[in-house]
Amino acid sequence: MIGVVADDTTGANDIGLMFSKNHYSTKVVAFDKQMDFSADVDVLIIDTDSRLDSPEESYDKVFNATKTLQKLGSSLFFNKTCSVFRGNIGKEFDAMLDALNEDFAVISLAFPKNGRKTINGIHTVHGRLLELSEFAKDPVHPMRQSNLVEILQQQTARKVTLVPLEIVRKGPVELRKEIEKQREYGQYCIVDSENQSDLAILAEAIHDMPILCGSSAIAEELPSFINKELVQTSLEDLIIDDPHGVLVISGSLTPQTRSQTAHLMDIGTSAIILDSRKVFDQQVKATEIERVTREAISIIKSGNNALVMADHRQEIVDETKKLGKQLLLNEMDTSKMISAALAEAAQIIIENTGLRRLVVAGGDTSGTVCRRLGIKGNYVLEEIEAGLPSGLTLDHSMLIVLKSGSFGTPEFLEKAITHLKGLFNQNDGTR
């Protein structure tokens, strides 16, 4: 079994997709202190939801999750992080090595299909230096550097080294030799990649190494070089019979999600906007959530789709941050309060309609909604766009799409709605 530890819910599904596309049965499970999981799939992914945790808490989660995967007999371990290194990267990498008593890991952060490239250790996003991309303004983990070696070295006492693109393009044999040479100088080896062909070379060179770290993109290439007998699983004759519309919850402020919600509204999807300025007072928040859910329930019951989203107009975002500061809240705490309000709204809407198809935009929002709904994990189903799959909750009660805020074309949310409506349809009974 391949064991993965992912630091957020959308990232867990992202890497799950890379394996499921290669016919690996894949399951995402939420981190739990008991973690009574079974090795009944080819790839088991533990979502620690630790990107916004303290460094110490994230270390403990990854250490314990890795130990669990080790006990289940994992032969390959993957530490899945954000593709732009947001989060407690050093602590989480250290936790996996410490748990396994290992002293070396290869790191690949490139995700060419989603515009992330690494050349000479410098990371770019859609052609812009990481420090000049939208991630420079991340409210929790602002990325103000582009040199991946420097970013990681600031977070770990272990030595970080780099293999440049010119070595990668000499082929897998020479690349493996260079990676083995790097063991003499450091414990973490970052490897450049600019395109999918580079990732294929890297995958061939390192497929038998015990620990890999970074973005999900390399996982799409790994199965071609892993000789593995796949576990046979079946979702049996599942039918999702749901006459309701699809509910879309959006809490992300990224440019990508902004364009996606704008597109939904342009094609006539009903949008109910949550006023984020009203989340700080319990009574005011309750009234606002009652308004939002009342409108959404009516739309969903009529068979139409509904978009429930936090108001992302810049003046409202700025006012919300200001109100939070007045209450001595940092931006992360304010963001979590908004996600919690959206999750509460989602729960009320679902309980009052019985809908079984849900799309959530934003990593933190996805994790918060899943916890509120008691979703302990999901099977990874089919790719909608690069890095963006559909899923079936472990209890088979709901079809979901959990979207990273910065992924997807402007039409993605529309595609996700159409995709979910076609899955396990009673008319044809097929996926």
Image (cartoon, rainbow, N blue to C red):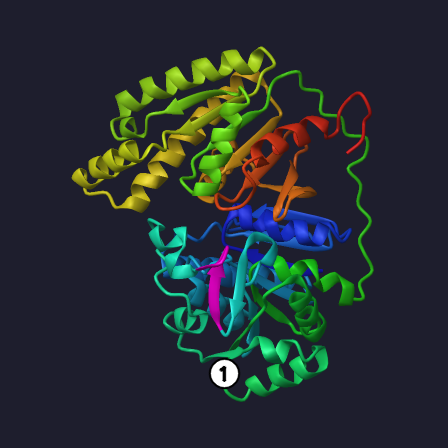
Q: Residue 44: image x %, image y %?
A: 65, 53
Task: Tell me: residue 123, above or below residue 33.
Answer: below
* Residue 393 showing in the rendered view: no
For the image, the number of numbered tags is: 1
Magenta segment: does it hold 122?
A: yes
Magenta segment: does it hold 250?
A: no
Identity, as a three-letter code, of the amino acid under mark 1: Gly
Farthest residue to the front: give it. Answer: 127
Quadrant containing the C terminus is: top right
Q: What stretch is highlighted in magenta?
A: 121-128
Task: Give neighbour class at mark 1: few <14, some 14-19, many 20+ (Cα, 10 Å).
Answer: some
- Left or right of 76 on screen, residue 339: left
Quadrant containing the N terminus is: bottom right
* Observer-nearest of 270 and 213: 270
- Left or right of 35 on screen, residue 145: left
Assign a secondary structure to mark 1: loop
* Observer-nearest of 40 and 401: 401
- Left or right of 390 on screen, residue 252: left
Q: Residue 17: image x %, image y %?
A: 66, 49
Q: Residue 399: image x %, image y %?
A: 64, 32
Q: Residue at 60% of width from left, 70% of height from top?
A: 211
Q: Residue 328: image x %, image y %?
A: 19, 43
Q: Residue at 62% of width from left, 29% of height from top?
A: 417
* Residue 113 showing in the rendered view: yes
Q: Is the magenta stretch mostly helix, strand or loop?
A: strand
Reading the image, the residue beneath label 1 is: 186
Farthest residue to the left: give it. Answer: 326
Q: Residue at 72% of width from left, 82% of height from top?
A: 173
